[in-house]
Image (cartoon, rainbow, N blue to C red):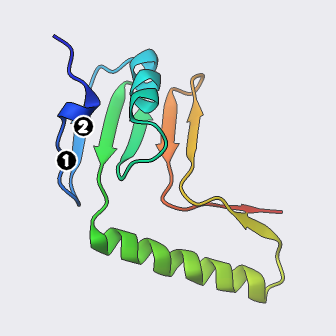
Amino acid sequence: MQVKLKQLIVPPGQQLLITDVSWLMYEQLLEEVGEKRGSRINYSEGVLEIMVPSLEHESDKVIIGDLITALLEELDIEFISLASTTFKSELMKQGLEADNCFYIY
C-alpha cells in the first residue's frame, strides 16, 4: 500500500517526520505537491520532515525578512529576495525549503 502526500493531514505549527525515505521518493513527493503549497518539505539522509507553519511563524518570518531588507538597503548592499526556495543536493542527501532567503552580492 502506498500513501500519497495529499492523504496526510498536518495541522499548522506541527511537523511530521518519516524515516527510511529514499532520494527518489523525496523527489517524487516534491513533484506530487508542486510549488504552490502551505507546507515545507525538508529532507536529510533518509528522514523527511513535513512542516506546516503556524500564523505566528509566518508573522515572525515577515518581520525578520523586513528587518534584513531594511538593513541591507541601509548598508547599500545589493541583494535579491528569493522568498521560499528549495535547495537540494542529491550528493549530500539534503533538501531544504527556506521560509525566506536572500542572495547577497
- Quadrant housing residue 14: bottom left
**Quarter placement of the C terminus:** bottom right
Q: Residues within 10 Å of mark 2 (few under 14, many from 20)?
A: few
The tag on residue 17 is 2
Question: Mark 1, mark 2: which one is toward the viewer?
Answer: 1
As measured in the structure, the alpha-carbon distance from the residue carrying label 1 to the one carrying label 2 is: 11 Å
Residue type (three-letter) at the residue carrying disc 2 = Leu
What residue appears at the point 30 percent right and 74 percent down from the top-left corner? 56
Q: Is residue 80 left or right of residue 56?
A: right
- Quickly name the residue at label 1: 10
Q: Is residue 31 left or right of residue 74?
A: left
Is label 1 in a helix, a strand or a loop? loop
Whichever of callouts 1 and 2 sits on the residue coming sooner in the sequence is: 1
Mark 1: few/some/many CA within 10 Å (<14, 14-19, 20+): some
Residue furthest out toward the top: 1
> Residue 35, position in %: x, y?
49, 42
Q: Residue at x 48, y 59 (%)?
A: 99
Q: Amino acid at mark 1?
A: Val
Closest to the observer, 55 or 14: 55
